[in-house]
Amino acid sequence: MKGREISLEGMDDVLKKFVKMAKMPDDKEIENKLYAISRSLQKDIRRAAPKGPGGPKGPGGTLRKGVVAKKFKKKILHAPAVFVAVDYKKAPHSYLVEYGTKGKRYATGKAKKASAGGKWLAVFIGRDGKKHRVMIDNTGQMPATPFFRNTVDQQKGRVEAEIKRDTEDILKRIFNGT
């Protein structure tokens, strides 16, 4: 073995590629690109959200304000991640708009008693033979207006294309040295 030499063709190119891979973008750059894409999706969802007539707390628009885009505080699978969702503290009625309501519903429980001013509106005999108090909650009938789901479905291709484009730009910059 002494005096023998091994040479690999193209090894210099491989080493150069490894040096360039060391220049991979940090997670902040990727996270910022993803966040920009999520903000554009958020704006599309806000545009699609119906604006209600308002109520005792002020003019309508809380549903639109409730659509948020945020960065996860912790990485998911060691990678940056973002999300678009409805903040239920800002728009607690969003599920009623998205999925609609059937009208009257029957609910039991002490938590509902307080919301009805302490009045129970119906009594029925259960299978156990005991009387159960039931509150009738009439939310009114409202058709579903799936603004969130429809917008996400419509914009899925655009979002995927933007992520692909940004990823290709990063890789071209790294491996082509631009």
Image (tube, rainbow, N blue to C red):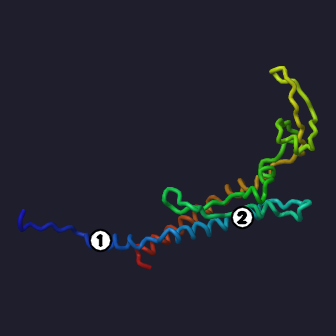
| Residue topped by disc 1 | 15
Residue closer to the observer: 109 or 67: 109
Query: Pointers 2 and 1 in contact (CB under 8 A)?
Result: no
* 15, 112: nearer the viewer: 112
Q: Position of residue 88 (x, y in %)?
A: 75, 55
The answer to whether residue 140 is left or right of residue 82 is right
- Quarter of the image that includes the N terminus: bottom left
Q: Residues within 10 Å of mark 2 (few under 14, many from 20)?
A: some
**Three-letter amino acid code at the position of disc 2:** Asp
Q: Position of residue 2 (x, y in %)?
A: 5, 65
Q: Which residue is mark 2?
A: 44
Residue 137: which quarter of the image?
Answer: top right
Tell me the SS state at disc 1. Answer: helix
In the image shown, does 68 or 89 lie closer to the viewer?
89
Residue type beneath disc 1: Leu
> Is 114 drawn above or below residue 56 in the view shown?
above
Q: CA distance from mark 2 to mark 1?
A: 45 Å
